[in-house]
Amino acid sequence: MSVVDTDPGTAVDVFGKWLDHFGQLLENGSTQSIANEFETEGHWKDILSFAWSYKTFSGRDQIEHALATTRETNKPRNLRPAAGRQDARFVRRSARSVIEAYFDFDTDLGQGTGFVRLAYDPARPTDPAIWILLTSLQELRGFEERVDDHRPTGIEFSQNFSGDNWLDKRHKTREFADRDPEVLVVGGGQAGLALAARLGQMGADTLVVEREQRIGDNWRNRYHSLTLHNEVWANGLPYLPFPPTWPTFVPKDKLAGWLEHYAEALELNVWTGTEFLAGDYDEEAGRWDVTVRRPDGTERSMHVPHVVFATGGVSGVPKMPHLPGLDKFGGEVMHSAQFSSGTQYAGRKALVFGTGNSGHDVAQDLYSNGADSVSIVQRGSTCVVSLVPSGTLVYSLYSEGRSAEDTDLITAAIPYPVLRQTYQFLTEKIRGLDSELIGKLEAVGFRTDYGEDETGFHMKYLRTGGGYYINVGCSDLIAEEKIGLVQAEQIESFDEKGVVLADGTAVEADLVVMATGYENLQEGVRRLLGDRVADKVGLIWGFDDDFTMKNMWKKTAQQGFWVMGGNLMDCRLHSRFLALQIVAELRGVAPTVTAVDHASSGVLA
């Protein structure tokens, strides 16, 4: 991105005039006249403010049709420059001169915020066309987040000398001895905590159950060397950003401690050491009958309207492959989810199956901690990028000086065709930056790729959640043959001492780590809620027909069941929208679902 050398006041002026004009059209103009404000192949993304879902409409015909169905229902009005957000400015995006700006608006349901990219032509300065438009619901009227001007005063605790103080009330609230929660969130990692924070600030009585003994253990118990692979300014959770003193790449234990602090600071009701045992939806009563087991072994049955699974970022149950002869192997076999540190395996001969992030990190950890030998087994080609600068390019929007929340709206605004094109552009740049590294890897037989359509590692994350490695040193060890490389198709079978290759070569091992990924989150649903619910919900994560994540952050086919997941950025952004949907149902203000909500977007490919 580069800022266009144009007077910032001009951008503010052009945007202000456009906003007045577009606002009048939106309230009183024909749907055709509104659609004609877009470029011929312009895009409109909406999250809950027009359609009660995540929708993308591309091209004037789709946009006009969507407006005809949704505008009168929600009555958007009172468009105005967004309070507290970055002013309109000229920038270059995808080799185009555009104005980027934010605006607020009202609907019958609440307050929304929009983001727009206007294609700017200096020859026609008063007539910019919409390239990309995002509209999003930010607040439900009557159920606004209790922040800033809506924050509680706390005065009741300074005047109540004979009753409960703040701490007494917190203990009682957290115990749920006299009531059942309105929302039960299963999983106390970043996804569950972010959602619980949003729900709590919107007034929904929420309980999080976490099977680990401490909040943050889902990070704390992972392998010793783990750090986040994206930069600190792109991360963080709602209401409480990371301190400006934090390192660019956050270590896992630092993040774990922060999550524990976050839950305390945001007054989240979390039961640790608590296992979700079973749940059954009562269609007649419109609620879940669930059972959880507390740390002391006692079981608690509850009746809750909404259950949210937040049990994994984008993946669930560890996947263990069935390999010929593995039952004959005399050494230790584990999944990477069980691997903590290579220190206890010094002097061992290790085989690591899988060449994603976990496989590489485990192999490097073992090598660095004195394993006698380490070989990594490649089962398919892998997209490899260097951590800096290549791995950080996809997050470059977050280093442009605006707040993370403002940048989140830009991220949410990008439609799939533009995202795909952008990732292809970035991947071509990464190919040049990493050419030396990739050449060395391929010279020793390591197979690399850049995705099925040259869109790179982050599109792989969105599509499947894996298939890539952000290099923090293991690729160099493989290229230098300090870590061995075996192609999976070379393996004939296991025997007691390791694996035998098709040419008869023996690769000795007494430790096998399966960094072979995880089952789809649907299988976690199946384990806890049974086949009927899991089959009804379907696959979770990866693009659906609307090019949004399947069954994530939005209504599923199972009434009262929701899924919350993703990385820290995803959780910060989408926790708001999922909380809005749940609170709207709890308070009886959820809009009637329309044909537009159900229809697939069919965006331009």
Image: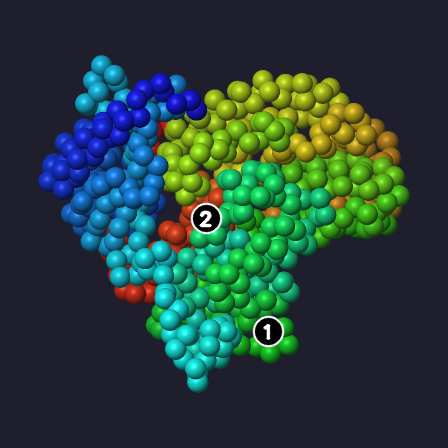
Horizontally, residue 515 falls left or right of residue 551, namely right
User: Where residue 580 sits in the image (x, y, percent)?
Assistant: 35, 56
Does 218 sit left or right of 339 as displayed? Answer: left
Give neighbour class at mark 1: few <14, some 14-19, many 20+ (Cα, 10 Å): some
Residue 572 got which mark? 2
Q: Is 403 above or below relative to 40? A: below
State the mark number for residue 455: none
The amino acid pointed to by label 1 is Arg
Looking at this rendering, what residue extends furthest in the top direction? Answer: 123
- What element does badge 1 sit on? loop
* Image vertical order of residue 176 relative to residue 127, above or below: below
Q: Quadrant of the C terminus?
A: top left
Residue 26 shows in the view: yes
Choose between 251 and 184: the one closer to the eye: 251
Residue 570 left/right relative to 82: right
Residue 498 percent location from the top left of the image: 84, 41
Total tally of numbered discs in the picture: 2
Neighbour tally class for label 2: few under 14, some 14-19, many 20 plus, Cα within 10 Å: many
Q: Amino acid at mark 2?
A: Arg
Residue matched to label 1: 294
Real-space Cα distance between discs 2 and 1? 29 Å
Q: Nearer the viewer, residue 593 or 83?
A: 83
Choose the circle earlier in sequence order: 2 or 1. Answer: 1
Image point 22% across, 20% down: which residue? 125
Percent position of residue 141, x then y: 26, 58
The residue drawn where x is 22% and y is 41% is 80
Q: Is label 2 or label 1 in front? A: 2
What percent of the width, then of the height, locates residue 149? 32, 57
Can residue 186 be spotted in the picture?
no
Q: Residue at x 56, y 23 (%)?
A: 430
Return the residue nearer the eye: 494 or 191: 191
Looking at the image, residue 187 sits to the left or right of residue 501; the answer is: left
